[in-house]
Image: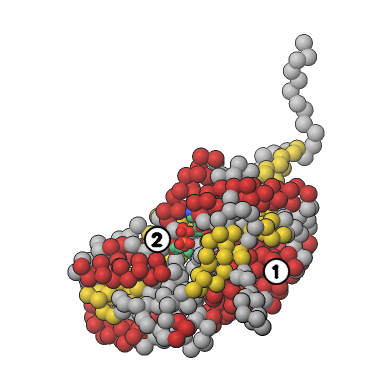
Amino acid sequence: MLAGEAPPTPMPLATSLIAGRRVAGAGLRLPVMNPALGVEIAGLAEAGPAEVNDAVVAARHAFRTSGWPQASVEHRQAMLLKLSDAVFAAADELAQLECAALGVVMRELRERHMKRAALNFRFFAEVIGQARGEVYDQTHGYRSIVVREPVGVAALIAPWNAPVALASMKIAAALAFGNACVLKPSEQTPLALLRMVEILHEAGLPDGLVNLVNGRGAVTGQALVSHPDVDLISFTGGTATGRAIASEAGRRLKPVTMELGGKSANVIFASADLERALDAALVGIYSNNGQQCLAGSRILLERSIAHDFIDRFVARARAIRVGDPLNDRTELGPMASSAHRDRVLGFAEGARREGAELLTGGHAVPVGGAHSNGYFIAPTAILSPSPDILAVREEIFGPFASFMIFDTYDEAIELANATDFGLVAYVWSDHVPTVERAVRDLRAGVVWVNTPMMRELRAPFGGYKDSGLGREGGEACMQFYTEVKTVTWPSTPVNVKKIGTG
Ligand code: NAD
């Protein structure tokens, strides 16, 4: 350091947060990269099994001693509303941190992700205010009631593509139904979630109810899901990881929800409002940098409209502004990592080799200045002759649309369902009987008709086939995050048969 020069600011370190306090153990230090700049902006202190154990012990302790599981619904609602307000007030700070490690454009983070995170706490406050039980009195002389109780300690595992928006739903649901939890964010995007959990504590959340451990899946995640004192596991991430975690949970007989990958069909009939369908097809594959589970990544077009639709789609895709995610004019930021950029581009090359036509994109985009090392790629689209090529079968998780053309309704449905996934599906038509048939025939957990994605939090969300197990949503989360207990008693004293009286 030269005389008179300010000392360098130490890089922020994403630690764990256990019982309300930041903890950095002796584990590995990993870099956290800014994908728009291609530079390291923070470190991550990886939690090993000992630290994960401390987090689970802290959660169990809070579950036993904080009074939270027994607290009145009004008390829990008031706390959830405070947490919601605190997240809302910090939306800008959280969006900045999320943007730094994820690269999704600030506008989307501020307007969608952070609002959604704040809303998640408010939503579950409302859900618990409306919960009701069951009564059975059909058996003469008896009444049975069914009550729900918190389960205990939940392990919550989040992916990198929408860290705060997705993990906040899990935290809010676990807390609302009286549980304690340990969250493991993705090692790529630990910054905003760590700050969010800190903010929850600053807003008055009792220590130990929400703990956070940072680190890689194979180390920190594995230690968490195999911990004997974890009672249930809520996972959002890739299908291969989901299978591994579900097997671990199966061995231990722990309940799981699995929100996994997708390769969703966007089926557009000639009878659709094509202007709207075009806008939605573009948003469906290129928003959130194309890195979203519910992307409409397979666009199926009826032959009579295909040529014109593709021409217009490609022209618009080429006009998408790629660049600095902090700039409010930017429409597509960088891929989340250099490895992910290379993987996405690899699919374009592979598709060409397998006989698909590369309509646009398939290459990196140079963005100058400070961003010259960022992981930017052009919005990409291919036209595939068949559903069998790799780029059409695999989840690419990037700004990569695959078009296919159909002639008949049956062919459309066959193509739409010709996938191992079944998270969501989109259908566009103004012909009511066609819509009704498609809604019935599409094999997906959510079907959106004549609209881009519209997440109704009250309704179950989750996938068919390799896209998941279980559902998230108001009622679905109540079932997952509570144990159910049946209590039976007689309306008048029972005459118990006497045995052992000689
Ligand atoms: P991923 O499966 O690689 O990782 C998800 C999380 O699991 C990370 O925190 C990771 O560290 C952790 N993990 C990895 N191996 C683990 C192990 N053995 N034990 C415990 N934890 C482990 O997924 P990703 O790349 O972070 O996210 C992208 C995927 O997530 C895509 O497939 C996407 O479709 C899916 N996703 C699904 C939904 C949904 O709601 N269905 C939402 C968002 C993302």
SS label for mark 2: strand
The residue under the point 61% across, 56% down is 213
Mark carried by residue 199: 1
| Residue 70, horizontal then vertical, whole percent | 77, 52
Can you identify the residue that label 2 sits on?
Answer: 422
Q: Residue at x 27, y 85 (%)?
A: 311
In percent of width and height, residue 274 lies at: 35, 84
Q: Nearer the viewer, residue 40 or 344?
A: 40
- In the picture as drawn, the residue positioned furthest to the top comes out as 502
The numbered mark at residue 151 is none
Q: Residue at x 35, y 57 (%)?
A: 420
| SS assignment at label 1 | helix
Beta carbon of the mark 2 residue lies under 8 A of ligand 1: no
Q: Nearer the viewer, mark 2 or mark 1?
A: 1
- Which three-letter amino acid code belongs to the residue tagged 2? Gly
- Residue 442 appears at what percent x and percent y? 37, 63
Colour scheme employed for the rendering of this structure? secondary structure
Mark positioned earlier in the residue sequence (2 or 1) = 1
Q: What is the spatial separation of the Cα atoms under label 2 and label 1, in whole angstroms? A: 36 Å
Q: Is 131 on the left or on the right of 253, as rendered?
A: right
Does residue 362 show up?
Answer: yes
Identify which amino acid the numbered label 1 is placed on. Ile
- Which residue is at the front of the view, 161 or 413? 161
Q: 96 or 164, which is in the foreground?
A: 96
Classed neighbour count for the residue bearing mark 2: other residues with Cα under 10 Å, few (<14), some (14–19), many (≥20): many
